[in-house]
Image (cartoon, rainbow, N blue to C red):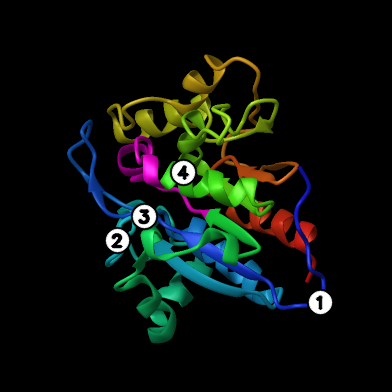
Amino acid sequence: MSASIDVHSKKKVLLIAANPGTSPTTGWPVGFWWAELTHPYWTFSEAGYEVEIVSPKGGDLVADGFSDPEDPSGYSAHDLISLGFKKSATHAAMLKGTKPIAEVDPTAYDAIFLAGGQSPMITMIDDTALHAFVAKAYEAGKIVSIVCHGTCILLKTRLSNGDLLVKGKTWTGFANSEEAYADAWVGQKIQPFWIEDEAKKLEGTNFVVNSMFKAFAVRDGNLITGQQQFSGGAAAELVVQTLGR
């Protein structure tokens, strides 16, 4: 399948971020990951695209603490793009009262982009309405791009013919090596399952990973995936390369 590309009109991207949740393994509040939303937003904006931010259920969005450049841990203190987004009243307001996907037509956009974070593993993995939304965009010839833990939905998203969207596809997502590192860093199991483990159980698909916490994104037709939080910009750039500036 090839993308339906109009090189003359202004491109529109629908950026989907996870709603807040609570991890059943850690008990922590979980949400989207700042860099996986702000870095793609920056890339798309610099390319001249219109970007709309929504969420599966709608409402106010909350980011994972470690992704916050102002978090006391200092884990993401280097992330100046996210810091700028947070400090801009105009941009910060885009995360308040987000529209739910039930009120959005995915075929009205040139691409949809799903940000990751810890929440998708809890709130998106079994969200059949979201899976159907993504499949509808894909079958309409739109670019579907997903990064980090958001790629967990590809374990279950099926097309209208019943096939997994990733059947015959090469794709990536959060790696086992990265999960193991994160678990060791915080001193406990974080995720309820590991995407790479589950992807390897699927027949007829090719899940690949690169080095730990290095930018890595893969395009296979209309599907573009990024490995982890450092891959949002790389995945967004592949979207831009596909659609044009």
The residue at 24%/39% (across/down) is: 23
Q: Earlier in the sequence, mark 3 or mark 1?
A: 1
How far is the residue under mark 4 from the one under mark 3?
A: 11 Å
Camera-nearest residue between 240 and 194: 240
Q: Amino acid at mark 4?
A: Ala
Q: What span is in magenta?
A: 114-129
Viewer-side label of 2, 3:
3
Q: Earlier in the sequence, mark 1 or mark 4?
A: 1
Q: Earlier in the sequence, mark 2 or mark 4?
A: 2
Camera-nearest residue between 59 and 214: 59
How far is the residue under mark 2 from the one under mark 4?
A: 24 Å
Q: Earlier in the sequence, mark 4 or mark 3?
A: 3
Instruction: Look at the numbered disc 1 and give the secondary structure of its residue.
Output: loop
Which residue position is annotated with label 4? Answer: 132
> In the figure, is residue 159 to the left or right of 69?
right
Cβ atoms under marks 2 and 4 closer than 8 Å: no
> In the figure, is residue 167 to the left or right of 95?
right
Which residue position is annotated with label 2? Answer: 62
Q: Can you give x and y, in whole percent of width and height, for residue 111 in the image? A: 63, 59
Which residue position is annotated with label 3? Answer: 56
Density class for disc 4 (Cα within 10 Å; few <14, some 14-19, many ≥20) is: some
The residue at 50%/56% (across/down) is: 36
Q: Amino acid at mark 3?
A: Pro
Density class for disc 3 (Cα within 10 Å; few <14, some 14-19, many ≥20) is: many
Q: Amino acid at mark 2?
A: Val
The residue at 42%/57% (across/down) is: 17
- Whether the magenta-drawn stretch holds residue 115 is answered as yes
- Whether the magenta-drawn stretch holds residue 77 is answered as no
Which residue position is annotated with label 1? Answer: 8
